[in-house]
Image (cartoon, rainbow, N blue to C red):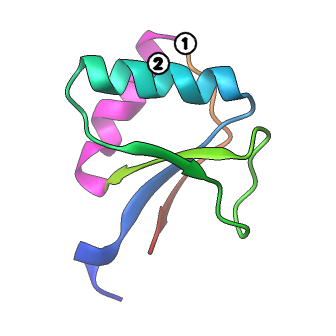
Amino acid sequence: MHSESLKLLITFPTISDAIALEKYCHLHNIPGRLIPTPRKYSSGCGHAWCTELDYREDIIQLMDKYQIDYDGIYEYI
C-alpha cells in the first residue's frame, strides 16, 4: 500500500452535514469532493467527503467550529 494513493474519507449521518462540510471546505480552500460512500463504509446519508490525507486536521477543526456531525473518518484507497 502506497501512502500517496491513500485518501481521507469522511462519512456523515445526514446529507445536510455533508453539504455543510463541502461548503466550508470550499470557503477555506480545502480541496475535495462529495462522493457516494464506498460499500465497505457506513454512512447514514450515503455520501462522503473525499480529500487528501494532509487536510485531516484542518477538516476536523472545521467540523468542530461549524458543528458538523460525521459518522467516521477513514483512510482508504
In the image, is residue 43 above or below residue 65? Answer: below
Q: Position of residue 13 (x, y in %)?
A: 74, 33
- Specify the amino acid type for callout 1: Gln
Q: Residue at x 35, y 71 (%)?
A: 6
- Name the mark on residue 77: none
Q: Position of residue 8 (x, y in %)?
A: 41, 55
Q: Is residue 17 shown left or right of residue 66?
A: right
The CA distance from mark 2 to mark 1 is 5 Å
Residue 12 occupies which quadrant of the picture?
A: top right
Q: Residue at x 65, y 55 (%)?
A: 37
Looking at the image, do the residues carrying marks 2 and 1 touch, with CB atoms under 8 Å apart?
Answer: yes
* Residue 30 on the magenta span: no
Q: Position of residue 43 (x, y in %)?
A: 74, 47
Q: In the image as oriented, which residue stretches furthest toward the top?
A: 66
- Count of labels in the image: 2
- Specify the amino acid type for callout 2: Asp
Helix or strand or loop: what does disc 1 sit on?
loop
Q: Is residue 29 shown left or right of residue 14?
A: left
Q: Residue at x 44, y 28 (%)?
A: 22
Helix or strand or loop: what does disc 2 sit on?
helix
- Name the mark on residue 67: 1
Q: Which residues are magenta?
A: 53-67
Q: Position of residue 44 (x, y in %)?
A: 80, 40
Q: Identify the image quadrant of the C terminus.
A: bottom left
Q: Dot 1, how many residues are within 10 Å of its Cα: few (below 14), some (14-19), or many (20+)? A: few
Q: Dot 2, how many residues are within 10 Å of its Cα: few (below 14), some (14-19), or many (20+)? A: few
Q: Name the residue beneath numbered marker 2.
A: 64
Q: Main secondary structure of the magenta part?
A: helix
Q: Residue at x 73, y 28 (%)?
A: 14
In the image, is residue 48 above or below residue 75? Answer: above
